[in-house]
Image (tube, rainbow, N blue to C red):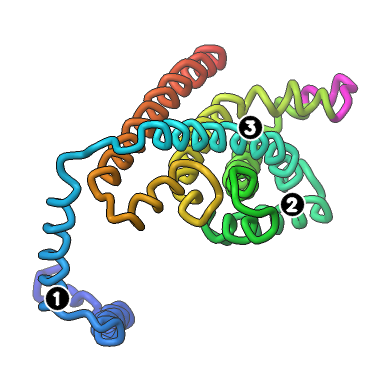
Amino acid sequence: MSAAARPALKVNWAARAGWLALAAYVVYATARLDFSWPRFMTGLDNGARFLQRMLPPRIAQPDSLMSGLAESLEIAVLASFVGIVLALPIGLMAARNLMPPWASWPARALIAAARSFHPVIVAIVFVKAVGFGALAGICALVVASVGFIGKLFAEAIEEISLKQVEAVRATGASFANVIAFGVVPQVFSRFIGFATYQLDSNLRNSTMVGIVGAGGIGGTLFSAFQRFDYDFVAAILLAIIATIMAGELLATWVRKVFVERGKVDEE
């Protein structure tokens, strides 16, 4: 077929209309949010002065800094442990290839509810319920852990090969043994990755929930902001960054050890 006889490419009017609608909404949203270039430049100037006041960092209250970091670490570890323990049976119940609909759908609804709100919002609710302190932070991060780990664990179970499960069932094994020998070996390495990531996420979130009174270094950071003690704010931020980087290195090492070992065992 000659080039002149070839049919021209069809114009995708739906895609063009979609892009035009998106551009129109961006313009509309910009106008609604009172965004302007002079205001943006003023913000940059204010931000530069704020950074100047933060330098050099100064540890004005070493005791409150260390106690806040220690409390954030404790909140993250306890919330991760409790959240993972609760998420395991919930994630198993949510797996549609192993459980009937009357069991999987309520479990999935619970996971969706746990994932619906940011941990800071949940922390505000628990602060109102149990009062200020680390308990509210632990409860908030437990809810976040259940939502994250439960969803990923359920999806990992749904992706397993059922041949191994059926082989274990054929031996007359109980349901618990089917899970232990037919399901867990196939998802163990992935679960370790999920768990270490959640611990790392809880370590970051534990510094945030303290801003609303749920314990941890966030409370110390908020107090420093209220006192306009910006050089101490810089020191707190650097300490948070160092703590999270250390947690990331530990999580990477754990994933490397267990995940690679799981791959070797599978081979």
Q: Nearer the viewer, residue 234 or 113?
A: 234
Q: Is residue 183 above or below residue 52?
A: above
Q: CA distance from mark 1 to mark 2?
A: 59 Å
Q: CA distance from mark 3 to mark 1?
A: 68 Å
* In the displayed structure image, the side of residue 122 where residue 54 appears, left or right: left
Identify which amino acid the numbered label 3 is placed on.
Phe
Q: Secondary structure at mark 1?
A: loop
Residue 171: within the magenta?
yes
* In the displayed structure image, the side of residue 16 where residue 109 appears, left or right: right
Identify which amino acid the numbered label 1 is placed on.
Ala
* In the displayed structure image, the side of residue 137 where residue 29 appears, left or right: left
The residue that disc 3 covers is 81
> Which image quadrant is residue 161 in?
top right
* In the displayed structure image, the side of residue 78 where residue 26 appears, left or right: left
Q: Position of residue 267 (x, y in %)?
A: 52, 14
Looking at the image, which residue is at 67% across and 36% down? 82
Q: Which residues lie in the magenta part?
A: 167-175
From the image, state whether disc 1 or disc 2 is nearer to you: 2
- The mark nearer the N terminus, 3 or 2, is 3
> Which image quadrant is residue 215 in?
top right
From the image, state whether disc 3 or disc 2 is nearer to you: 3
In the rendered structure, find residue 5 and report the number of the disc placed on it.
1
Q: Specify whether residue 13 is in view.
A: no
Q: Position of residue 68 (x, y in %)?
A: 46, 37
Residue 166: within the magenta?
no
- The mark nearer the N terminus, 3 or 1, is 1
Looking at the image, which residue is at 55% across and 32% down? 74
Q: Position of residue 51 (x, y in %)?
A: 16, 52
Identify which amino acid the numbered label 2 is placed on.
Ala
Q: Nearer the viewer, residue 208 or 52?
A: 52
In the rendered structure, find residue 107 and report the number of the disc placed on it.
2
